[in-house]
Each structure stands twice: as C-alpha cells, then as structure tokens.
Amino acid sequence: MKKVPIGRASALVRHGTSFTCRSFCSATSTFSLKKVTKTNFDSALEDLRGHVRDADFVSIDLEMTGVTSAPWRESFEFDRYDVRYLKVKDSAEKFAVVQFGVCPFRWDASKESFVAHPHNFYVFPRKELPFDGPSYEFLCQTTSIDFLAKYQFDFNACIHEGISYLSRTQEAEAWRHFNLEYEDDLSKEVRDIPLISTVDVLFTERVKNRFREWRDGLLRNTNVGSQFEGNSNDSKQKFQTVFFKMRPALTLKGFTSHQMRLIQLVIRQQFKDLAYVCVYGEDFVEQKLVVYTDSEDDKHLLMQEVKDGLHKEAERKIKAAVGFRHVIDLLSSERKLLIGHNCFLDIAHIYSKFFAPLPSAVEEFVSSFHKKFPYIVDTKHLLRTNNAIQNLMKKHSTSLSSAFAHLCPEIACVAKGSTLPHLSYLKVEVQVDDMRSSNWNSGAKHEAGYDAFMTGCVFAQACSRMGIDFKLYSPSTVLAYNEKLQKHMNLLYLSWNIGAVIDLSSGKVTPESSGFYFNKRRYPEVVFQNIVLFWGFPSKLKPRELRECIAKVFGPDSVTAIYYLDKTASFIQFSKEEFVTGFLVLKETLERNNDPISVLHPLSKLLEGGHTHAAKYEVYKEICSSAISRILFADQANSVCIKLREELDTQELVSSSEISEAGNSISSFVAKSESKSTKSNDVLNDPSYRHFSCDEMNDALYIIKSQLGKQTKNAKL
Amino acid sequence: MSRLLQRRFLCSRGSSNSNKNSNQQQWKVKQVTKSNFSEALEEIKKHIQDSDFIAVSSQKSGAFSAPWRRVLPFDTPETAYCKAKDAAEKFQLFQFAVCPFSIKESKVIAFPYNFHLFPRDELNIGMPAYSFSCQTSYLTSMAREGFDFNVCIYDGISYLSRVQESSAKDRIGNPISRIHPVKSSLAQSVADSVFLERTRSRVRHWINACKDPIPKKGTDDALIKSLRKLILGEMFGSRPCMSIDICSERQVELVLEMLNEFSDLIGLIIPDKSGGPKAVRVVLTSSEEDKKLLERELENIEEEENKRVRGFREVIDAVSVSQKPIVAYNCLNELTFIHSKFLAPLPQSMSEFMCSLRFAFPCILDVNHLLKEIGPLKKAKNLPAAMSYLKRQFFAPLDMEIPHQGFSEQEHEGKNHGHNVLRITHLFAKLCLILKVTRDSNETVNDDLNNAMESYANNFNPFCTSVQEPIDGEGMVWMDNTRKVSTEDLAFLWGFRSGMSAGVLKSIFRGSHDVFSEDFEVRLVDKSCAIVVFWTPGSAKVLLNVLGSGAVGSDGLTEMISEGLRGAGYELYKRICRLGLWESDLAESLDRALEEPIPDVLGADSTKDLSEIYWSNDVIKLEDL
C-alpha cells in the first residue's frame, strides 16, 4: 500500500506469479499468523514481551488508510528534503494506521536457524476515554482502501475489534484531565447554592429528615439495614442501604445533578458523621453514596480510601486506553534493533500516533525519534547500497516482495529453477502460538504481519550475504553493534526517488551513496533557488508551449527543466537565478499593464484566465506545510496564499527589486477578485489532476533530455 | 393554516397506542450491492414510477469534525448551510436507502432498497473521490449496530456525479454516436467546402471499394484480404469503417451533415483526451435494416456504458426524473450530501444551493418540519422518540405493506440495514394521517391538499440532531420558551479559564460590568467558547466595544480582559463559516479570523453580506432541546 499507485500494479502482477509458483511447493505449512485484536490483546502482549526480550531484531510493517491527501502531495523529484518531510508529516497526521505487523526474530543456535513470531495487530483509533478529547477523525484515500480490499483486508475486524491507543502526549493529557476532575470531585467544596425555589427547600428538608432517620436508626440498632428498608417503602428505589468499605452506606439513585448538589450541601452542613462519595462500582458504573463514619478520623480515612480507589480506577482505564502503545513502549524500552522496509513514513506514523505531534522540522523529528529507537535499519537502503547484495539482486526491483523472492527463494517458494544452488540460505522457522514450521507461508501479502515477516527474512539473508555469520554468534552478542551493519545503521530514505538519505542519529541528509540509481536520473540537477513555482495557468497549456513562451523572452537556454505537479501547476527551473527574479517581475508588470504591448507579449499567453500565479520555491514549502489539502495544487496554493498576499500588500511592493528580496513573494499582488465559488468549482469540475497525456509527458521529457544533452556536452568541454 | 391543523388534530387526539404493525423487526429492506445492482435498478425504476413519495436516508462516514461544527440552535440558515456543506464535502456515503411508497387510505405500500456504496475509482480517473474522512466515534457506533464494512468496501456500488460524468466522458474516450446531428446554421466558407468536397469523395471511394466484391482467387485470398484491410481501414464489429481526422467542432458538424447524404452510413465522434473531437468514424451498414440494428446496438452500448459510469447515480437520476416528492429526515444534511456526491459541487450560498436543488428535486418534504406542526414534538430529538409520542397521543392505525420482503432474505442474511428509511416512511405516513394531508390515491391531486403539501415542501429545518449522532459533551440547553433574537444581540466570548461551566461564567459576568446588569443568558458552544444572548438590544455592541477598547476601570470585566478574554459579534462567526476557517476549537477559529484581514478576494461576497444583515429572517430561534 505504501507503494501506491505506481508500485501497485507491479505488486499485483508479482502476487499473481508467486501464486503459481507456490503450487510447486508441496510441504508448505499454511497456518495463519498471529492475529491480535482487542479480545486477545492482553495475553498476546504478555507473550510478545518474552519474544521481544529474546529477539535479535524485530521487524515491523504498517498498513495505513492512505498515503497522500492530494495528488500533488506525492513525492516529486523536485522536492527538497524539508519539503519531502512536510509531505510525510501531512500523511502521518491525516491517515490512520489500521494494521501493525511486529515480527521478533531470534537466532536458535541449536537448530542453526532463525525463529520468527509474526504478529498482526489490528489497530483502530477508538475514543476509549469518556472526556472531551479531540474529535478523532482520519482520512481514507480511496485507492488505498480499494487496494487493501483487493488483498482481503478485514475492515470489520479492524473497526469492530481493532485495538485502540493513546500517544504519550494524549496519555499525559488524560492524566491532567483526570486530576482536574478529581479535584473538582473531592477537594473543591460544593458552592453554596441559595435555596430560592420552594421545591429546593422542600427537597432539602425531606432528604435531611431521611438521612437523620437513617443515621439515628444506625445508632439505635446495630442491625439497621433491614429495619430502615422496612420503614421506607416509598423511597426504596432512591435510597438503598449497602456496606461500603466496611461501613454502612446509602446508595443514591435517580436524582438529578441539581438534587445531588443539594444532597451534598445538606450532608456537609448538617451531618458531621456522614460523607458523600462518588465511586466506580464493580461494573465500572458511577455510584454515589452517603457513608456513615464513626469519627472525623474515620471520615478522613474513608476519603483517602475513596481517593485511592478513584486513582486506581483511572489508572486502569488509562492503561487500557493506552492499548497498542504498550507494544511500541516495549520495542522502545528493549532498545532492540528494528527493521523496516522503506520505513520513513512508518516511523513518522509511529511517532505521531504513539508519542507526540510531529515537529515541523525534520531534524527535530529524527533526533526525538532516535532517542526512543536508537537502532533501526532500512532494508531498502541495505539492498540498494550494498554491493554484495546488489550482485545477488541483479538489478531486480528492490520492492519488498521482489527482494523476498530473490533473497529468500526457499521461504518464498519460488520455483527451484530460479534459486542459486551454490548459495546456502539461512533457515527461518516460524512459530505462532504452539505451531511451528520451518517451511511456512501464509501467502497473505500486504498484510502487515506477513510483510514484517518478509522484511525480517530479507534482512537476515542480507546479513548473511554481508558476511555476518550467525553460527559464530553467542547469545550475548548484540546484532545492533555489529560493525558490518554500522554503515547502514539509522540510514533511511527520506524519499528514494530523489535518493535522499537521512541519518537518524545526526539528522543529516545526504544523497544516496551508491551509484546504482544516480545514473538513471532523468532530471538535471535540481537547483532550488533557480526554480519558480508557477500555477493557475490554462490547463491546456502543454509543457513544450510553456517552455517556448519563456524561451522567447529569456533566451533559448534559459529553462533547464519543467516539471508538472498537475495540469495547472508546474516547476520551472531556470538556468540562472536572476531569471527567477526577472520572470516574477515581468509577470507582475504584465498583469498590471493592460496595454496592447503587454497583451502581445509572449508571456501573456501563460497569464490567460487571470488566475496565474508564480512564486519562489520557498512558497512551495509554505503551501506543503498547510493542513489544508485541496485536490488541485492551484486551489491549494490560492487558499494558503490569501494570507501571504495580504502580508505582501501591506509591504507596498512597488519596486521590482523588493519583490525579489521578499523570500515568500508571490508575484500576483494585483488583487484579482476571483470569486471563491468559481474556484471551488474548478476543484471538482476539473478532476483530471495528474493525468498527463503521453504527449505532455514526452514534451516534458524532451525538454529535459535536450537540456541534459547540452549540459553533458558543456561538462565535457 | 397551522393553527387550523392543530385544532384538527386536537380532535383526533386519542389515547390508543395499540398498533399491531409496529414491529419493525419483521420489515425487510432489500440490500443492493455491485452484484445485484442491475436487476435492482430495473425494479426500483418501476417502483419509483408507480409510487407517490420517495423516502431517502443515508449512512455516512461521519457527521462533524468538532462539537461546534455541528449545526447548532443559534445557526442562521446560512451558517447552518456552510457547516452542512463542509460535512458533505468531507465525509462519504456508505449506504443510501431509497424507499418509494404510496399511501392509500390507512395503508402504506413501500419498497425499501438499501444500496451499499463505495467511491471506487472504477474508471481509473481519480473519481468520484480522491479521499474521504471518517469520524471514529461514528464508525464505532455503526460497528456496534452490526454494520458490515467489508460488504460496503468490497462490493459497494460506485458512482459519479453529473458534473463528474460530463468531465469523465471526454477522458474515457469512448466513441459518441450522434445519430441526429444538429443542422449547422453557419454559411460554409471556402475552406469548409474544400474540406467537405475532399472528404465526400474519400468516403465515396471507400464505399465503392467496400462494396466491390472480393475477387475470388483462392491462393492470394489471405494476402488480398489483409491488403484490403490496409486500404479500407479497420472494422467496427463486423462492419467496415473508416476514420476521418477532424480539427474542429465545425468540421464535425460538416462531416455529420455530409454523411446524411448516404443512407447506409453512421458517424461516430471519437473524442481525444482533452475532450475535443479527434476524428469521425464512419461505419458502413449493409442495408436500411442493418442500419437500424446498428443504431440500436449503439444505444445499448451507450446505455451499458452509462450504467458503468454513473453507477448508483442512475437511482438518483430516476428519482429526479420522476419529480416525485422526496421525504427525508434532517433534510439539510441529507440533501447537501446528495447534491455534492450525485449532482455537482456545492455552491457557496444556501440560496444558490436551494435553486440548484429545485432543478433536480422540485418537492422535498422534511419530516422534522412536519413534526413542528405538532407542538410537543418539537422536543422529540430523534425518530423513535417522535414515533412513540405519536403512538401515545394519536389514534391513527396504519398498515405497512412491503410486498417484496420475501426475497431479500437470501442475500446478506442477518444483515438488514437501512431501516431508517422505513422509520421515516412510517413516521411520515402517520403524520400525513394525523395532519390529514395526503395525496389522492388516483393521482388527481386535490387543490387544498396540494396547497397543504406545498406549505411543507422545501422547508428545511436546520436545527435538529441527526438520527444517531453521538452525543458528547454538554448539549446546548436553552430556556423553556422560544424567543426570537436578532443575531446582533449575540456575542461570542472566549479566552476564559478552561473548564468553566456556563453557570460559573454567568455568575462571573453578572456584576462585572453595567452591560450585564440587564437580563442575559450564557451558553457554552464548546469548551473554549461561550455565546452570550442579550435581551436588551444594543447591549452586545456595548460589550464588544468594551472588549475592543480594553476599557480602563477596576471592574471584573477589565480584569478578565487582562487575563485574555476576547469577544466578537455574530458577523465574525458568519465569516468563519463562510471562509471555512474550521479549527477544532471555536476559539481558535475566532482568533484566526480576527488575525486575518478581510481578504480582497471576497470583495464580491461582502456586498451580499450587507444585505444579509438587514435580512429580516436573520433571527434565530432559541428553543429548548
């Protein structure tokens, strides 16, 4: 699902082929992996604690309800690393995690094989605590949901039975809330309510008499309970004598909250030996009682007991509400080596769902995350940068299922022909509850638990290929310290199509080290300060026309590349930074003047319709950081930029130089009153976002190729 | 009118509550998914034609994103619409129940269908919905009622709105047959006639070549055939055809007109990716009869294609075409969803929305509005409550007959969703009996009754809670009697210490300033913001001036201002709703709206705004809930 939508088609095909391959395997055990829902969560968690403690590494995988909240939020080659992070952040904040796969792997020296315990947790962000938290809401991307459905994802299990969770921040908030309420209940005295209405006066008198009668009855006779009940048939429903913490008490039922307040008042003012308490009964239902106490000390004791009880109750409730986060806490506290496949988005989800809201800067995020999970290895990075494995993969796709089929053919049950007989494969035994198998395949691809299992297998094989010999391995060795792993440790792809790798321990972003991908880059080097973000132009404008228009003004070599975000928005990379300023200024002048010369100007073709805007690259970052997600980039930009434009208006940008100075400058100051209604219509009327015709694509490529050719020539010279 | 009706039902008031047909468990609703959609569509089309009313009810993925974003009693129709619009755009429909029914004396004949929907991108064009929101509490309560999400997602029927369809048609790129071309009115230019003449001769040559019998020379047969194919062009099914490249709409017209000269040709327009015509494909038929056959074939193809593209919207279209009155509960909510998912994107204002809606559905009856006619029912918060009240208070025996209930049992056993539509049907029929408004059975509409119906039609009642809205936090409780308040006498206050109740706030405000010496009410909108109602006109303005100037003085209000108390009038609230500054707390939204100067972009709107202020309907009813 993470590879939607481009990776999806290939995954589907591969899925089909692996099915046919599977028929060659005769002795495959096909018991299903451990499915954990809220009904068996507690016991599963206890088992998992043991497995994780003993594990050498733990692989994880997540299934989400979507990846991008708008087409233009997909990963582009023109995304700077900080922009890329903002897109990941947006995704992690908006979408829900519905399945969480955890698979601890332990080296069994006696059998010379790994033992894996794949777990598949169904997760659903239910609101478990009663008080007014944020209204939980999440986004679903239709294609992702449909993709999950294709792989038979059980939505009922997820929504009916999914395990809920609280992040650490939410838990702290819950405690704060509880303490506040708790003070209200206990320490804070009931405000004196003036008894104005006769009804209140009568009621107060009546309950006062009732309590006095009951208390006096208690004092007269030790065998009070039955006697009192006998006396008061009329109010049996409302007052019932019980014992509360070894003391006689009256339960209060069927009163309004106003009457309850009056009762509290009466008790406090009139009865020194009675105490009003509010507790939770056996079935966790709120219960209000009036308790008789022997003395002032006894009363204090009682109140303390009640307080402790409430505290315990809150603890139990909050602990239950923390739910799935216990698994995350376990992984964090055990400081185990975590394995994921292309897992930057996964860790962003983990952080935002189980720790705290994501920080706005990527450096801050990775350093906080690193403190919680010090060792993490991305198998995608491992596969793509390690030469030994590269040779083995023979340039096959590094998608998870492809890597699994190539590195673990025996487990993946690929037909014998394709395996390499001279290579020995690590054995992996699977254990689910009491069932064990050394030849296991549940076949449920794109199920988080199975994907986690595959990731772990790929990692184990990769380790063995890199020369880590588990047979020489003693139980005290910590895999995470292995020096052969260090050059992959904590290195994650921020985005693998731009080849940006982030080091979680330092927060540094570097281009991919291996030359594997670099040669294949289709685009010239991206220079962000040479880029203009251009949007709102007529949707029929083709990249070639756009390029020609600009070339007429700034010269044939002025445009290095053009990249379309969607059909009415694009990046234009100029060959020199001054063209950026020139373009912005020119556009603004043209818009302001409506004389014939301006109309005939080559650029005015781009400004047709009057909704065209242009800005520097920084504005793109601003737009990406917005919580809004409109389908078309132009609509998004306009709704984000209303505010920016206002700021600029006040700055009275008259001179052109100032325009270029303003970092966030949007060149469309000429306030055009596009009415909002037409704008919103555009969003839905014109949903052909991101669907370029072949021609358009070719045009775009053509431009780039020709530019590339020139560049390389220049370089050679 | 309403007084007259009230008197009428006072007479009919009885104490009987015996109703042998009240057991709703036995009612079966036909469940429709992808697999049985085609047959169900044919059935329901017939029922829609035959019945008097059509009840609708839907199951959504959520209702509101924050407590204050519900439609609240102090919302004007305009702000209520903005809120409903936002919800309709964000959330998704999972089920849509349609129940065509007729009332014949005291008998209701109903045909309830429940359609499972999912906005699957069937045509791979990013429609109908790129993404949608889910409210977890909503899903949880649906789960508790046994909702089957798998059926919905795996087998739900997809759809496209009318606007989406028209933009999708071009992108799918299927040939469009235009059997009866419009006569071109323009005179032909020289270029036109050159083009026409060239094309005409091309077509003529091609026809002759096609009709030329294949010379029988056994051995070269295959070769000649393929050569012929090369020259004559492709085949359309079993019939020969050729393509004529086209540069403009004008040329399409010319070619189609020219084709009329030939009795055995049919022209199909082939659109390109951007929707404009790319070519005209000319198909040669062998006879007049064959031509008719092809035309029918093309019609069928188009029909099938439409079914595939429109999906569930076929049902909505059938309802719309029938022009039958629509019966719904919580109409504003229901119809904003219908409009946004099946017709077109929602317009900016309520009046535009009502206009656009009236084109599709000329008569809409809001059960909530009918309930208002029976005084005490104003208190009924939901369908069951209203129903049980009616049962207690009125004697109106009613027979529900659901003729098709037998055969729905095989499918989705034990999963009988979409009952709300039957509850609405039942309640509506009962109200009709009690209020004595019903259509004559033989379709001759009595003028009086028609008028009565008219007075109820298209009157949306925005102030109501939805059928199964999860209740959280403290609800809005207003005074016992309904009083009209101008929005000018309302003020929003925020920035006070969190956790204060309305009562506490009121007691703090009282005596903090002269403004609060008169009678006023305080209610919490959400935990961050309160609304103050002044019964003395002008007080709100005074208060806001004091808050704005941060007045000097030693009174309590000044102190609260220094602690961060802020205030705004109703206008700001309206602006928030209109601009969609939806934050999770109202206070946050108000702060944001204060920060942002009124953008120029909305220049067009601000004039409209002015008229709203003086609009006499711009008063809100504060009712007890």
Image (cartoon, coloured by chain):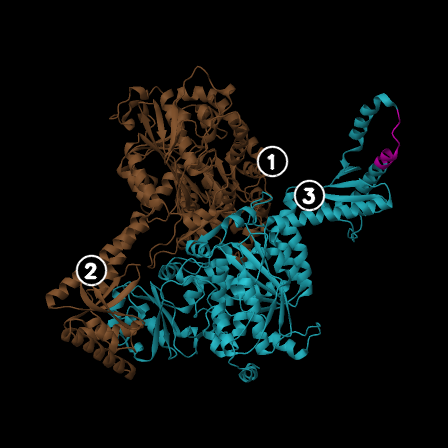
Chain colours: A brown, B cyan
* A63 left or right of A486 in image: right
How many numbered dots are placed on residues in this image? 3
Q: Is residue B544 above or below residue B219?
A: below
Residue A460 lies in what quarter of the image? top left
Mark 1 and mark 3 in contact? Answer it, CB < 8 Å: no
| Residue assigned mark 2 | A307
Q: Residues within 10 Å of mark 3 (few under 14, many from 20)?
A: some
Report x, y in % for residue A127. 37, 54
| Residue drawn at point x = 19 percent, y = 62 percent | A245
Label 1 amino acid? Answer: Cys
Q: Is residue A513 above or below residue B535?
A: above
Mark 1 and mark 2 in contact? Answer it, CB < 8 Å: no
Label 3 amino acid? Answer: Asn
Q: Secondary structure at mark 1?
A: helix
Which is more foreground, mark 1 or mark 2?
2
| Residue assigned mark 1 | A694
| Residue assigned mark 3 | B174
Residue B218 lies in what quarter of the image? top right
Asked if the stretch drawn in magenta spans residue A28, the answer is no
* A530 left or right of A302 in image: right
Closer to the camera in the image, A250 or B483: A250
Q: CA distance from mark 3 to mark 2?
A: 73 Å
* A606 left or right of A46 in image: right
- Are the numbered discs 1 and 3 placed on the same chain, yes or no? no
| Chain letter of the residue carrying label 3 | B
Bounds of the magenta segment? B205-216
| Chain letter of the residue carrying label 1 | A
Which is more foreground, mark 1 or mark 3?
3
